[in-house]
Image (spheres, rainbow, N blue to C red):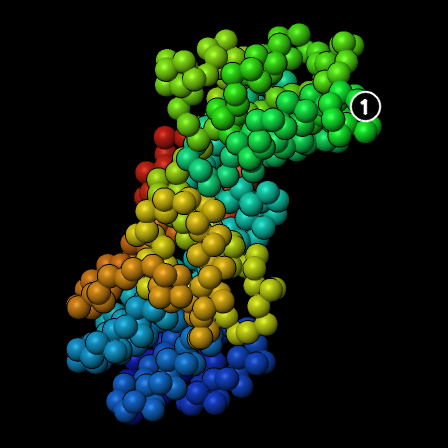
Amino acid sequence: MIDLSSRPHPELSPAGFRGWHLHVATSLAEAESLLQIEPFIVGLACFDWNDDAHNEALIHFFQQHHQIAWIAAIWPEQLQDVGLRRMLFENFYDYCSLPLGDNMEHLSIILGHAYGLYHLQHIESRKLESDAPFEMVGASPLMLDIFEQIRKVAKTDAAVLITGESGTGKELIARAIHQRSSRRNHPFIPVNCGALPESLIQSELFGYEKGAFTGASQRRLGRIEAAHQGSLFLDEVGDLAANLQAHLLRFLQEGTIERLGSNQSLEINTRVIAATNIDLETAVKEGRFREDLFYRLSVLNIRVPALRDRGADKELLARFFFNKFASDHKGQLKGFTQEAINAINRHTWPGNVREMINRVRRGMIMSDNHMITPQDLNLETDSLPLTPGENLKTLEEARAEAERTVIEHTLSQCRHNVSKAAKVLDVSRVTLYRMIEKHHLHHHKDSTPH
């Protein structure tokens, strides 16, 4: 607890914090010393808000130690100051009003929630790092469904068509399917059908013999042949010219290819995973894509959601990429301001995950402070809420959303085995059942053996 208030508040004496290991600092310097000795999870701060120099020192301190879940104990009249409200909004988990009177139990509940949520978030952070080798980060229902589809699709050798807007991560899903399949120890060969000139793509796909055309000084294997025993990923398959669609169809039907300049048929055993950001069914109706090839490619379908539809995944991805790129920056960047997180959640992300990567990189380069702001990300901001009630509502909603996301993701990872999920989350089964009910997640059946 940091106690910098000049006004008496006997209810915050150590005797009122039974069950907590309490350290008290009466200056920012003393607090800094304590933080150097021992890592703290939750902090309670009681302070005056008066002159600019003092206020700036407070802001700097809380920004420096943003990893702690801070709760403020402040006097109601202090909340009339917009600068203080902004500071609470950006740096604090919650606040309570002094004098507490009979509300000490309410403060204890806030402290307990902050402590519990810290552990949930850090469990989730570690799980994201271990479960996301291909940056497949997400805990929204849409992405949990994608992960389940990947697990199912990986067990077969049937062709897969992945659809979705540009930048949604279709190649990452293709790689995830390959890495979870029986072909994982063989090549994954990507081909961007839209990036190769039409004059080159046939030789790139099927290879050629020496002398097949001017400049063919030696035999070269094509991408399909290179993917033998592995997986061939055809990105932007909707851009293939009509003659190449016919060649690809023949390969899918017969499992053989002929190199350019050769009459010899080669048997190739590869799994084809295709992706497109166009509506292939419309392309078929308009005569731009072969119907028979469409059905050959789309034995299995995965539709990748746009980032704007993925709810809390936007914040998860922003923090994931921040941590991923942090080693490239030698400065003192700590993360995002609450305003930046709000802007990230409001933005519609027309460029999807690719845009997220670019904006996070930009923010880390452009930031002049310890925290990335909406301006650093080049995102628009809303005006600051004008009343404390709006701030508190926003904090409560954010806390509930984070808690729900963590529980939902953990249940999915544990295949909805409540006993296992409770152990991962370090709560009792009864507590987890209550949280499942609270967040309306009870439609999943518990797969715990009885």
Nearest the eye: 105 or 222: 222
- Residue located 32% across and 47% down the image: 348
- Residue located 72% across and 31% down the image: 187
**Image position of 276 (left or right of 15):** right
User: Which image quarter: residue 159?
Assistant: top right
Q: Residue 71: give x, y in percent of width and height.
A: 35, 71
Q: Is residue 363 above or below residue 315?
A: below
Q: Residue 188: give x, y in percent of width and height.
A: 68, 31
Three-letter amino acid code at the position of disc 1: Lys
Q: Is residue 218 above or below residue 370?
A: above
Tell me the element at label 1: loop
- Residue located 49% across and 26% down the image: 239
Badge 1: few (under 14), some or many (20 or more) residues near its Cα, within 10 Å? some
Q: Is residue 278 above or below residue 157?
A: below
**Badge 1 is on which residue?**
210
User: Which image quarter: residue 183?
Assistant: top right
**Image position of 397 (left or right of 136):** left
Nearest the eye: 359 or 49: 359
Nearest the eye: 189 or 47: 189
Residue that lies at the very extreme toward the front in this rendered image: 214
**Image position of 421 (left or right of 381):** right
